[in-house]
Amino acid sequence: MGRNLVIGGLGAVGIYVVRALLENGEEVVIFDTRADLPPNAADVKGKAEVFKGDISNWVHVMEAVKKYDITSIYHLAAMLTQSSAADPQASFRVNVVGMMNVLEVARVFGVKDVIFTSSCATYGQITPPPKMVYNDTPQRPDTMYGINKLYCERLGEQYHRQYGVNFRGVRYSIVAGPARPPSYYFYDWSGIIEKTAQDKPYTAHVDPKIPCGYLYVKDGARALLELKNAPESKLRQRVYNIDGFLATITEVADTIKKYIPDAQITFDWDRGEDMRAFNNANSFKVDNTAATEDFGYRPRYLLDEMVQDFIQEVRKGRGG
Amino acid sequence: MGRNLVIGGLGAVGIYVVRALLENGEEVVIFDTRADLPPNAADVKGKAEVFKGDISNWVHVMEAVKKYDITSIYHLAAMLTQSSAADPQASFRVNVVGMMNVLEVARVFGVKDVIFTSSCATYGQITPPPKMVYNDTPQRPDTMYGINKLYCERLGEQYHRQYGVNFRGVRYSIVAGPARPPSYYFYDWSGIIEKTAQDKPYTAHVDPKIPCGYLYVKDGARALLELKNAPESKLRQRVYNIDGFLATITEVADTIKKYIPDAQITFDWDRGEDMRAFNNANSFKVDNTAATEDFGYRPRYLLDEMVQDFIQEVRKGRGG
Amino acid sequence: MGRNLVIGGLGAVGIYVVRALLENGEEVVIFDTRADLPPNAADVKGKAEVFKGDISNWVHVMEAVKKYDITSIYHLAAMLTQSSAADPQASFRVNVVGMMNVLEVARVFGVKDVIFTSSCATYGQITPPPKMVYNDTPQRPDTMYGINKLYCERLGEQYHRQYGVNFRGVRYSIVAGPARPPSYYFYDWSGIIEKTAQDKPYTAHVDPKIPCGYLYVKDGARALLELKNAPESKLRQRVYNIDGFLATITEVADTIKKYIPDAQITFDWDRGEDMRAFNNANSFKVDNTAATEDFGYRPRYLLDEMVQDFIQEVRKGRGG
Amino acid sequence: MGRNLVIGGLGAVGIYVVRALLENGEEVVIFDTRADLPPNAADVKGKAEVFKGDISNWVHVMEAVKKYDITSIYHLAAMLTQSSAADPQASFRVNVVGMMNVLEVARVFGVKDVIFTSSCATYGQITPPPKMVYNDTPQRPDTMYGINKLYCERLGEQYHRQYGVNFRGVRYSIVAGPARPPSYYFYDWSGIIEKTAQDKPYTAHVDPKIPCGYLYVKDGARALLELKNAPESKLRQRVYNIDGFLATITEVADTIKKYIPDAQITFDWDRGEDMRAFNNANSFKVDNTAATEDFGYRPRYLLDEMVQDFIQEVRKGRGG
């Protein structure tokens, strides 16, 4: 069955990929900049080894693949949107040089699969929102994060075309789940559930009425495994849009209150230009048709299912 | 008026940018991996200084910009299609890390302009040929060279958006002119004129009947200067398609014979799959409308004008 | 008077260099991987700007020097002995590539001074201890940290010889002072004072009887300024040994008890081979003669003065 | 018996290492920046494969070691003294980053041996000449080339000490042999024989009377194989001085005339300061005692034997 390397495996999405692989009975090595399991990942202790490494350092990538005789790589490490904007050169090293390191090592060692998480940030601003995004909607990213992800998609395709590296990727919309790193723009969608499940108050500041393209972390993780396991003959492209559902923060709050009636949620709408742009940029529904047809992906967690499960996960200690 | 750095200024296109700037009375420093002027560039001796540098080495870029107090950079250095395919990591260093070096140095030093040559290779395979390519035709490159050029376009836009670096670029179709480096796929279009103007026989192996999107080097060089000098308010985008004309190699040969009646040209059509793909990929006419409207670019050299001028250039000693 | 960049300026030694420069009325910019002042550095708030940067990233070094028009660099950033051993490639990037970044930027921008902290770790194992180390004792380092520091000394000399960069450096013995990062081997010498001054118990595990070559952080910082201000004509070399005094941990403990009679200190001597090697490697007195003659350096803090001052510093809130 | 990778195997020394290994019946892969065999290396055609690679590019090093399942690396690639002085950053990449690439790949892949060529340039200027240099003479290099070689020695030792990489190295004095690249300072010693053996005139410009520490390329190559094959228990150090003999250029000229009576040799002594420094820096005899005792190295080619053999080699077509 081989051995999987999950790069960024202690991140908010990565840890759910690790769990999904372990549930399948697969062997997993976690590659992360941290050496120790954080409290929210305590459940994988003894089940998956952790290799401390920096993806921008080729030696670490080569060493991990050689040492564990890796057959499949799930690559989920990235500097996110705001960090990438604050330091483009550092973003280049982690997101772009890191990808080259993965692809070159995979090519030379004959690693069978490279499964990559791209982003709907590769589509750039879409006006007016909400909008439908198809797999063939032209990609015109307008952030350092987005242009790097787009280039990584093209690099992966190139190593597939030229060397036969089995590169496959997904584009996520906004992923919600426990233990996401707090950030001003991207955190509301997870934080509102995480904090209230921890019996803490939460104040949301995104636009209460603009729906956001939303994907629950368990659907995101499962999509990667389904894509990895799809027969090559079924795939008509290398990178697939993956969607969950559209919801406004008001709808999220209302759903929380069904399960946590005394949740303390307040709204403090930030009407500034940056927030408006952020809300617009993420107000799209992505077309899952190709993912459904080619490898059977369909979201299992819509708003209600997600909120229930998310609360349970946090109460199991998987929150941040 | 400032001082211009022409990176790749001893290349086949770069040297014509150098000449065009000198004709305008501007100061020019050539940045190239070669230290000495090759015979075909002897005419710029004493008029432009040469700085020996490697664009993938940030120290060289920083040093050149600091030493000469550069105000505008024309960036024409690149590993071309076939070299990039043979060594993707080296192509990454020259074409991508090189671009980051230029943009970071330009940003920190406040260099006013960064003028960049991208390529219609960013559009990828187009079937069936010939086809019209518009500025907003989706870009789906399918070569290491093409994906790197596309990423460079996005990086330039990002440094403009985020830091105000005055990045402007063009996408060339196949550039013909003297002293192009011989290569199996791209050389026929120039070689057929260059060799016959040197009274040598020439055998073409591209498809005799598929027209190619063709741009004479003098039009390409002039387009860069016109774009650089356009008022910012006129520009509706950062990167513009630049075209010359469509012609088959048979038409090129016929035109040569008008001016060199005893030219020895033979055709040895390579009917292989790679050549077919190459011919198709380059059989497009690109729409100049945006370039014409925004900064007045129109090709001055169509087939007949190009052949006449090219022959004269070679006879002046500017061939390879 | 110019403007100073203190690289690693929020480190345990760097912050004392910052303070010494500020006391002289000089302008200071702190370059550090942290963006915010830690509590122990609260006193420099409003007096020195902090530039967040990574020395292994050339863009950060170039940008800091350009933005603040830096005339003198004090370079104190390093991955220390144990981190360097754990990840040689990362140590190479920070300690060696970082030094190249500093020297190249200094050279191209004409930064007047580059003041560097090397280490007596460049001498390697010395047996039997204790021993006298002279400036011309052959350097045979035997750790990744030590070989990197030695190479940095030679690089600095080379950029002085070849380009006139005013490189000057010091070799410290073990520096003691507040807020040193805890580490198994190097921390006892500072920790025993810091913790007891904070009314906490402390257990030392180094050999109670082998004396260690010891330097108080205020002497170390002052030595850099004295070296920087020495006339060029006085200097007979580029790198100078800087010493404080020799003391056993038992003597340190006894001195602490003079000023903190109820200090809770226990000894739990680690008799293992690694600790023995560590104690031997650091049991040397370095000869200050050259530093005294060439720029007037003499330690002001011997054991008793150091302990008194260190306790006061910690009680001012400068501990870790 | 394993498979050998000779990095820099088409260089003047490397090709003799290749030949020596082939004579022993060993398998050899040549790693060089050139893809094709130059005329002087035509004799190894069909006997050793050539891998085109750049040592400063980690992908090339990793790929060569993986592809050919290499068990021993002979690393002879370097930017030499004058190129290193002209571009220290490029020298850093080739000589230092290149060494890190070799050591990291060797460590991770478990390559059994890394045999390295250092240089007596690590000793720096020695005054007054001539002088004896012992293995434990302190190393104080004073050129970019020399400090890089010294650091590489220390890196090799560190990877041996820390990871058990079987690093072994030699320090050559000035190597003479066919096809050395012409250079103002280092070429006389080879050029005077090479050119006269090709029936061309030669003008020497080094000091006619200062003897130079001289090593014939066949002795240098053989020393590497002897060192590689020595039992570990015999080795008291990792890097050994290797010497040939001392001779003035006048003595070399006189010996040539014994075998080529009508050789046209003239002297045009460059009395400038740089040449004087060069002559002094290389006027030393290195002590071979350790090499003799530990692995039986003794020079077989003293002045007369070298001149005879060198002339024959050139006449076989092995000159530049």
Image: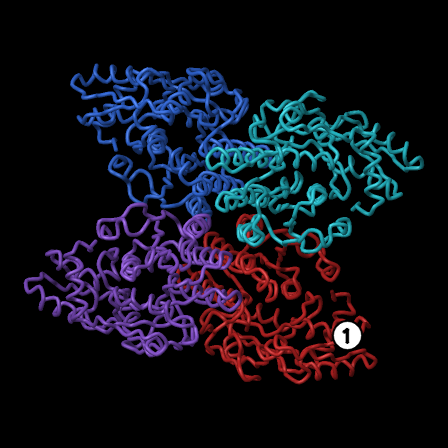
Chain colours: A blue, B cyan, C purple, D red
Q: Is residue A289 left or right of residue A196?
A: right
Amino acid at pointer 1:
Tyr
Image coordinates of residue B74 in percent, x first then y, are 62, 42
Furthest-right residue in this view: B262
Nearer-the-camera pick, C111 or D108: C111
Instruction: Work out whether A100 lies above or below D150.
Output: above
Q: Chain of mark 1?
A: D
Q: Is residue D316 left or right of residue A259?
A: right
Tally the marks. 1
Residue annotated with mark 1:
D202
Residue at 21% across, 64% down: C189
Instruction: Residue B122: name its quadrant.
Output: top right
Q: Is residue C146 visible?
A: yes
Instruction: Residue A36: name its quadrant.
Output: top left
Q: Is residue D84 left or right of residue D159?
A: right
Image coordinates of residue A228 in percent, x first then y, are 46, 28
Q: Quadrant of the N terminus of chain B?
A: top right
